[in-house]
Image (cartoon, grey):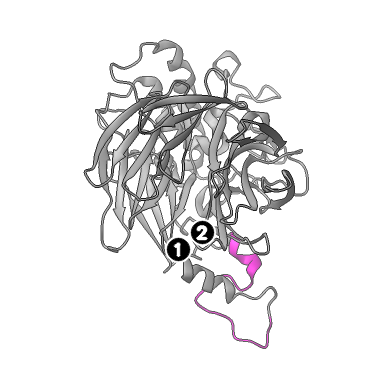
Amino acid sequence: MRILPRLVGFVRFVAAVAGLWVLSGAADAAPPAEPYLSPSALASTRDGKTLFVACATADRVLSYDLEARKITASIPVKGSPSGLAVSADGKQLFVTCAVPEGKVCVIDLAKGGIVSVLPVGHTPMAPVLSPDGAKLFVCNRFNNDLSVLDLKTGAQRRIPAEREPVAAAVTPDGRFLLVANHLHTGAAVNPWVSAVVSVLDVRENKLIKGLLLPDGSGALNDIRVSPDGKYAVVTHVLARFRLPATQLDRGWMNSNAMTLIDLAAMEGINTVLLDDVDRGAANPWGVDWSADGRTLIVALAGTHELSLIDFPGLLAKLARLPATLDDSKPVDSTSASRVRADVPSDLAFLVGLRRRAALPPDDFGPRPVRAVNGKVYAGNFFSDSLTVLDLADQGARPTSLPLGPKPAMSPARQGEFFFNDAGICFQGWQSCATCHPGGGRVDGLNWDLLNDGIGNPKNTRSLLLAHKTPPAMPKLRRSARAVEYSFSAPRLPSGSRL
């Protein structure tokens, strides 16, 4: 059996970072002079002149003039804003906020302030307007349901979802709402363990279908519909949790993926890996298309990159694959995938179809992305900045657009950054947040780790309040120890040290 030293180092480092993260929160109570912004959501006006930025830890929404490249307004929104939706006429902005209770703040953009507050569920996210502007859909993450609000009457209907709905997208005709559920339901010992994309019939106000993803799929973060309304894409992690954790390379533990959905058939087309053979693409997050639908953009939050994919080329390559192998026909020697079922395990499928663009040196944690006027903008959670890239220029490099002064990272903020950074992991395959998404919670899977032998997989434990519990597994075996070891130097924000 081969156990990579880097894997052992990574497990130990997870424990060290987790300890730093949870313990420093109590020791570092004083906030910085300037609050962190933490861009968590982006939305643009239909004319493409203004980009709105939800700042999760600064309780505000910024209005950013894309032509002048400057902030034109800072609108206070108490409650950790998590999602944005702009009305078609550009007059109103709907902002989901989670603290102290779930609500949607309706902002009059001409007045620059909140004009009404709509109560919704626990930790609301991803507000989506119907094409006619009459309804607002909201994902209530920890209520496991959706709010459907009639904006004319104020009436609200709550519809059960699966587990932790975190993102949604509506079809252009307004008939269906696709909802990305962050985690799977049911037991982790089931024959098939996967989160689903729920399909809501908007006219009937009921869920009509659950689109099952490949076994091991979880940590869904975003879902978007293509400009022509024919396809949707959802980003997620594809965990190989049924294998013992003996190595990290080639996505042995976790690979990073997106699943394509055919909206006419309302069925999945296939799941494509965002990784390379020797280079992971940890923690895929936001997704969007260029206006012409030719470029699909995915934010790689753990490796601080943008993945730019030739979407027509991807569709064509998928269409050439048969469902079953026909020995009478020649095999495509340019692809490791011989049939459609091979694609979710093919780390080289995007070769020749994708460019990975590294963010500027001080931009970290791209989460939301939006393509506007031929450019893509990414909101960088840990660097309080936007990254912009010209999609028409294949040789262009991303540039950074600061959203304000960058306060020095406190120990707690550094711990949160390291927890989400795949730069400390061998080849960038995963971060601590891969198995503990949602701020240190769980992926809901059983893992067969090596510190207590092979053959006894156990459910991932939540790290919430972990500093109040012993560093032990359920059978009291110590989970890991923070010890000295060698690893590649991670990419750190300015002023940070490890």
Left-right relation of 65 to 423:
left
Please give the residue where the numbered disc 2 appears in the rendered image.
226
Q: Residue at x 63, y 69 (%)?
A: 340
Report the span colored magenta. 326-344
Screen quadrant of the C terminus:
top left
Residue at the far bottom in the pictured view: 328
Query: Along the line of sight, which residue is nearer the eye, 48 or 419?
Result: 48
Q: Identify the secondary structure beneath mark 2.
A: loop
Badge 1: residue crowd in 10 Å (few <14, some 14–19, many ≥20)? some
Instruction: Name the mark on residue 135.
Output: none
Query: Along the line of sight, which residue is nearer the eye, 425 or 238?
Result: 238
Whether residue 93 is visible, yes or no, is: yes
Q: Identify the secondary structure beneath mark 1.
A: loop
Query: Along the line of sight, which residue is nearer the eye, 214 or 334?
Result: 214
Q: Tell me if residue 162 comes above or below residue 278 in the rendering.
A: above
Left-right relation of 479 to 362:
right
Please give the residue where the numbered disc 1 appears in the rendered image.
293
Residue at the far front in the pictured view: 152
Dots 2, 1 in contact, CB < 8 A:
yes
Q: Where is residue 96? Give x, y as percent.
A: 51, 31
In terms of sequence position, does the residue under pointer 2 or pointer 1 come before the other?
2
Left-right relation of 110 to 227:
left
What amino acid type should be assigned to the residue bearing mark 2?
Ser
Whether residue 16 is visible, yes or no, is: no
Q: Where is residue 76? Give x, y as percent.
A: 38, 23
* Res 3 quadrant in image: top right
What amino acid type should be assigned to the residue bearing mark 1?
Gly
Q: Where is residue 473? Give x, y as percent.
A: 65, 25
- The mark tally for this picture is 2
329 inside magenta stretch:
yes
* Res 164 quadrant in image: top right
